[in-house]
Amino acid sequence: MRYSSENLVVRSKLKPGEFGLVNQVTPQSAGWEHLSAEVRRLRAGESFQWSSGEHEAVLVVLGGRCAVSSNRGEWKDLGARATVFDGLPHALYLPRRTELMLTATSERVQVAWAWAKTDRDGQARHIRPEDCAIEERGGGNASRQITSVVPPGFGNHRLVAVEVYTPGGNWSSYPPHKHDVHREGADGKLIEADLEELYFYQQRKPDGFAFQRVYTEDGALDATVTARHDDFVLIPFGHHPVSAPWGYDCYYLNFLAGSAQSLAAADDPAHAWVKGTYQTKDPRIPMVKR
């Protein structure tokens, strides 16, 4: 697939007050191999059924509460925050061949989940807010908060999931980095993984937006997209920094899958030097606390 600013962003199918399938990405629509994702919004009492098949999956409650019954266990009260800006997540890791039914137990619930093919079996896990490590990354107006949901070393096959909070006026996923080649050092340590990545955006204010550039060093791809509430942005390859305009706090949920269960990445050598210039931390970080 030839990527451009027109097909790297997947717009929400619904307005904020509507219910149903909010957004969706498949390997066929994205032009890649591993990663699929959906977001749904339900009213109280509404349910949907889903089967993972030969895929592992990660389900993240973005807001509201729900109950999940499955052949892997039952979780009768999943979720706590009203929106992603109100607390840390409840999530589920689900192995292949999971059959589930999710039912909204609050007036409104929004959930996101991603899945990737696997030939391995695993154990279902409830990930609670206290399980999610918080990292303050960057400095100055490149400060942001990283919340680990399914981090490297989780024990699963491919999927990684993290939440990122960027205060208005700050840069994120910065300096620009990529993870599109599987490279190991002489010691066998992974230097860079080949990963497909999704950004699912939420904005604190309904008119909020962010800019994301996706580019390669040789210029073969150089696209800038505007990411709004409930949009997906595809990162098939290349560097991919984000900028949040002043006044508009930005959240994105990253799902990744590829050659390793890893976040190993390579900075753009033209911009890596900025890491050595950070002198202050943004006092707004962390934006969401335990």
Image: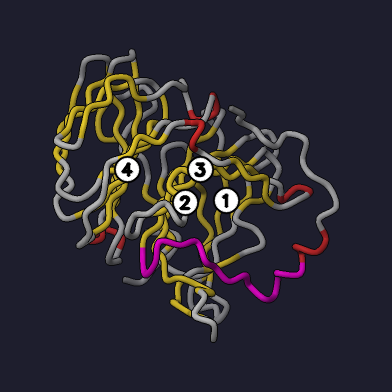
Q: Amino acid at mark 4?
A: Tyr
Q: Is residue 136 above or below residue 186?
A: above
Quarter of the image for the C terminus: give it: top right
Q: Is residue 130 magenta?
A: no
Give the image location of residue 36, x and y in percent. 28, 53
Spatial CA distance of label 3 from label 4 is 15 Å
Q: Nearer the viewer, mark 3 or mark 4?
A: 4
Which mark is first along the chain, 4 or 3? 4
Q: Residue at x 54, y 61 (%)?
A: 240
In space, the residues marked 4 and 2 are separated at their CA atoms by: 11 Å
Question: Could you tell me residue 266's position as x and y percent?
Answer: 58, 71
- Judge the density around disc 4: few (<14), some (14-19), many (≥20) Cα neighbours within 10 Å: many
Between 267 and 120, the residue placed more toward the observer is: 120
Between residue 59 and residue 39, name the one nearer to us: 59
Q: CA distance from mark 1 to mark 4?
A: 30 Å
Q: Are marks 2 and 3 in contact (CB under 8 Å)?
A: no
Between tags 3 and 1, which lies in front? 3
Q: Is residue 167 left or right of residue 22?
A: right
As for residue 264 lying within the magenta part, the answer is yes
Q: Mark 4 highlights which residue?
A: 93
Residue 249, placed above or below residue 45: below
Tag in front: 2 or 1: 2
N-term mark: 2 or 3: 2
Q: Amino acid at mark 1?
A: Phe
Q: How many numbered badges does the structure rendering display?
A: 4
Q: Look at mark 3 in the image and give the residue it sits on.
A: 163
Q: Look at the image and give the residue range highlighted in magenta.
A: 258-273
Location of mark 1 (residue): 211
Residue placed under numbered mark 2 in the picture: 151
Secondary structure character of the magenta stretch overall: loop
